[in-house]
Amino acid sequence: MEDRPKKDAVVTEFRQECSIRRTAKVLDGKRKRIREDIQYLIAHMALLVPPVAAARGETDISTQILTEALGRLGDDAFAQLVLQIMQELK
């Protein structure tokens, strides 16, 4: 009878490990999709920049606009993620 608690513990640990792996896989997929969406947004910032600024060749204006907009969101973690991705793309 002493074997039963050990087996139950092993089964519980196994199920927990399976759940952790499954959750990690879902989170990794979501993280990749979010990063792709943010990369797409950054790549298409020209669509959000006023045509006058774009015509003058002001490339930093999109960075300034994005930084200001992120500051207004009040979500530091998201802002850091977007800025990190923006730096990776440069």
Image: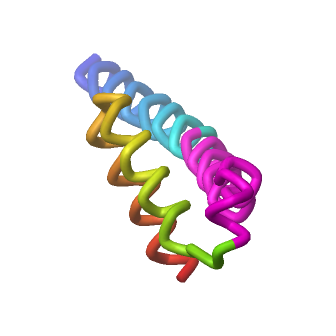
Q: Residue at x 47, y 63 (%)?
A: 63
* On screen, residue 14 above or below 56: above
On the question of residue 40 being in view, the answer is no
Q: Quadrant of residue 72?
A: top left
Residue 25 picture location, percent across and down: 60, 46
Q: Residue at x 67, y 51 (%)?
A: 50
- In screen coordinates, is 71 left or right of 70? left
User: Is 40 covered by the magenta stretch?
Assistant: yes
* On screen, residue 28 above or below 78: below
- In screen coordinates, is 88 left or right of 47? left
Residue 79 picture location, percent across and down: 36, 46
Q: Report the front residue among 33 and 1.
A: 33
Residue 49 picture location, percent across and down: 65, 53
User: Is 36 covered by the magenta stretch?
Assistant: yes
- In screen coordinates, is 12 left or right of 2? right
- In screen coordinates, is 30 left or right of 77? right
Q: Identify the image's colour scheme: rainbow, by chain, secondary structure or one colour.
A: rainbow
Q: Residue furthest left?
A: 2
* On screen, residue 75 above or below 47: above
Q: Report the front residue among 31 and 75.
A: 75
On the question of residue 14 being in view, the answer is yes
Q: Quadrant of residue 84?
A: bottom left
Q: Residue at x 49, y 77 (%)?
A: 88
Q: Residue furthest bottom?
A: 90
Q: What is the magenta range?
A: 27-55
Q: Report the front residue among 50 and 1.
A: 50
Q: Quadrant of the N terminus?
A: top left
Residue 64 picture location, percent across and down: 42, 58
* On screen, residue 73 above or below 1: below
